[in-house]
Amino acid sequence: MATIAHRKKRRSLRRFVPLYLMLVPGLAYLVLNNYLPLFGLSIAFKNIDYSKGIWGSDWIGFDNFEYLFKTSDALLITRNTLLYNAVFIVLGLGLAIAVAILLNEIKNRFASRLYQSVIILPFLISIILVSYLVYAMLSTDTGFFNKTLLPALGIEPIAWYTEPKYWPYILTFVHLWKGVGYNCIVFLAAIIGIDGEYYEAARLDGASKWLQIRKITIPMITPVIIMLMLLAIGRIFYADFGLFYQVPLNSGALFETTNVIDTYVFRGLMQLGDIGMSSAAGFYQSVVGFVLVLISNSIVRKINKENALF
Amino acid sequence: MSKKNTAAASLLLATAVALSACGGNNDGNNAAPSGSSAASGNPAPSGSGSAAPSGKMEEITVTFPMISTVIPQMPAIEAAINKISQAKINTTVKLKAISSGEWVQQTNLMFTSNETMDLMYVSGGLYSSMVAKNQLVALDDLLGQYGDGIKSSVGDDYINVPKIKGAVYAVPSVRDLASSYGVIMRKDLVEKYNIDVNAIKTLDDFGAALKAVKAGEQGFAPLVPPGVNMSFLDGFMTYDNLGDSLGVLPNYDNGLKVVDLYETPEYKELVTKFRQWYQDGYILKDASTNKTSTFELLRSGKGFAYFAALKPGMAEQEGKAAGTEVVAKELTPVIARTGTVTGAMWGIPVNSKHRESAMKFLNLMYSDKDIVNLLDWGIEGEHYAKVDGKDGVIKYPDGVDAASTTYNMPLGWMFGNQFLSYTMEGGDADIWNKMDAFNKSAQHSKAMGFAFDATPVKTEFAAVSNVVTQYKLPLETGSVDPDKVLPEFIAKLKSAGIDKIVAEKQKQLDEWAKANPAP
């Protein structure tokens, strides 16, 4: 009995040899590009001295990490980064799913393609251009809001770039406007993959569109939703640098609501140019992201084992 | 879950992981610089490509920043330079331009991956940290052996300014080595409102001029920032900023006592004045977030004046850039401090294996007229032509002008000795004599020669830098009320650790003063 199973296993192994061979180039790339540089993480714990090289430089423990925690802004930037990203994940995914479902309901192929293209267009615009588009809207003297919209509504002009309280909304709006098209394509692909028979059966039983969405579409794409969410959580400590640096035009008055870890590190190290400290920031962000992914994945696994990533 | 869905999901996962990996590489604080990306920039120079004369010929790589790195004429210039350098010092050079926006990151990568660099541009802002990280070679012995041309052209006053802990790690280029601060105004408006430029001696005099223009002109604020992301005080300095403005020396002396600039009464007075101007409408409303260049504002009639660091020929230079004639007026005396001298320098990186040849070539950049002009203006007959009867004056060849020339390198201040550079016809042919006199006439800050190493307080430095970016522009453009915001700014600086930086700076300055007693 045992030998038969063993032989079977051997045979199937041999059957997979070509597949393993096909894996080699990708694996080699992964090792060279993603795993070898991991040794560079040691830079975060060193005081780099170029005459000694990376390996020869002195170890200094956690000194390079200090500036991330020992300042009055530490709490602020952590709060901003986490809250913005949490909002982006929830609203971003929700909106993308909604748009994907709506797009899927459009039966006219041409119209569907047109809407898709229009929705994804902002994703392709460089963040620098986006920042100028926003500026065209919000400029104090010449912006569309202050010049046209607010006077028409009888509201006094607002100095947008010195009022931090508006920026959580502005940044969230810009992020959603820019990112929704891309995420929605992922969901659309998943929705299209759902077997049409489910809907047919539901229709025969007299289920409404809303019911079909709730009982068929959403459950069928749940694995994709969870996967994208877990990936997003893994990057919850990384902020979109372009969005937070370029769009508010680096305006100091707005830091209370626009300073995040990435912009803080950038501004802090502009003059120092210390690669040890920038590595420390990157390392810290990755570790937190990794831990959060592990935690959220284990929560998902507790609830529904099949939906967990690993 | 159907099989199809699982497959789709895992495919998506794979793409998403790959995408996020790419994203990670782009966000600037990537943990590990991969050697391959740095090395792919330029193929390794092959040592003995050309016909070498007898003896051991060496090839050195010269690295410098440039706004546009694609210059088709570069190989031809390089060949012409090599002809001279081969004959004189048996060395050929390879010019390697790096986009100025990526300068810091690229050169850091080149250092970590041990790429060939023999001579490199060193900017003053990075100098002390480069020395602290041991990226540069001490030059004293090499200068003594091969650097006579450098020493004589830079002059005794300034050659030792970059000295750190008893050794010189870089030499300043010969250009304007001092500056006085003042204002630049549009000539048409100065004439229209009969402004007596010579009578402008203080900020209040200048304020009166702004008032006259504001009263007469509609639709724009007369005073604009000195540049994008710059405040008025970046163009009007009355103190030695000791490198970074975190801890300064008021009046360039103050008995060598370092103080926190933002707590001084002078600072308060200045920002209060700017606030008044802002409220009177003299200042561009969104000055603190302005992204339009000063020249663009002037050219389009949206501005009248700005603060600037001045030097001989400044009005001409700025007028050309702005496309409208301007006049300049100094408000402070001419002063040299570490920053004005070390602004642009050349050094030899530790990676270099040809240090002697590098120094010999650097010496040519300071003493050989032909090499300087090849770098500054290109090849004679092709990119410029000499004007008959006028020594050192050139013009564009027939059928070529400033817009259509194929070699445009506005970096004369960087390439060694600018005083050897030709001047363009129509400009001031005597400019380098004036500049030389300007440098020699300058008063020296009491701390000239002192360079601060921020490494011992880098945690505080990073935190304080953030606080300064937050408050500096709004305050120094008058956009916010200093009575309310300045105390907040000072308190935040304190909690971020400015006092520790000032104390460290004082300590280093005292040590420096002990080692370099005033003459």
Image (cartoon, grey):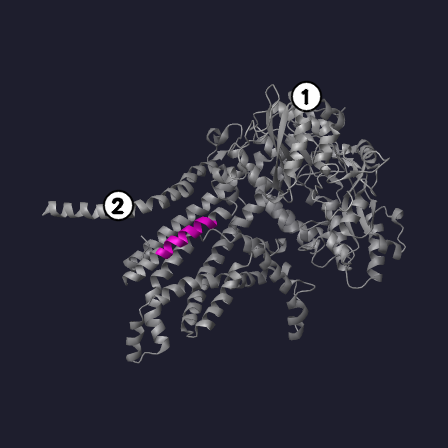
- Counting every numbered tag in the picture gives 2
Secondary element under disc 2, as helix, strand or loop, is helix
Q: Are marks 1 and 2 in contact (CB under 8 Å)?
A: no
Q: Which mark is residue A17?
A: 2
Q: Chain of mark 2?
A: A
Percent coordinates x, y for residue B416 in the rendering:
71, 32
Give the residue number, with chain letter if any, for mark 1: B146
Is residue B216 shown above or below B485? below
Q: Could you tell me the amino acid type at mark 2?
A: Val
Give the residue drawn at x 44%, y 52%. B19
Q: Is residue A77 left or right of residue B200?
A: left
* Quadrant location, the N terminus of chain B: bottom left
Mark 1 surroundings within 10 Å by alpha-carbon count, few (fewer than 14), some (14 through 19), many (20 or more):
some
Q: Does A188 lie within the magenta span?
A: no
Give the SS element for disc 1: helix
Q: Give the class, few, some or many, for how many residues have Cα within 10 Å of label 2's Cα (few <14, many ≥20).
A: few
Q: Which residues are magenta?
A: B11-23
Say whether residue B178 is visible.
Answer: yes
Q: Position of residue B319 (x, y in %)?
A: 79, 49
Q: Amino acid at mark 1?
A: Tyr
Which of label 1 and label 2 is nearer to you?
2
Position of B43 compared to A227: left or right?
right
Q: Is residue A272 left or right of residue B205?
A: left
A64 vs B265, left or right, is: left
Seen from the viewer's position, the closer of residues A192 and B158 is A192
Q: CA distance from mark 1 to mark 2?
A: 65 Å
Chain letter, disc 1 residue: B
**Residue A305 position within the rendered picture, expressed as x and y whole percent measured from the top left:** 28, 57
Seen from the viewer's position, the closer of residues A155 and B119 is: B119
Query: Residue at 56% of width from left, 41% of height from top?
Result: B105
* Residue A187 locus on image (x, y percent): 40, 64
Q: Are marks 1 and 2 on the same chain?
A: no
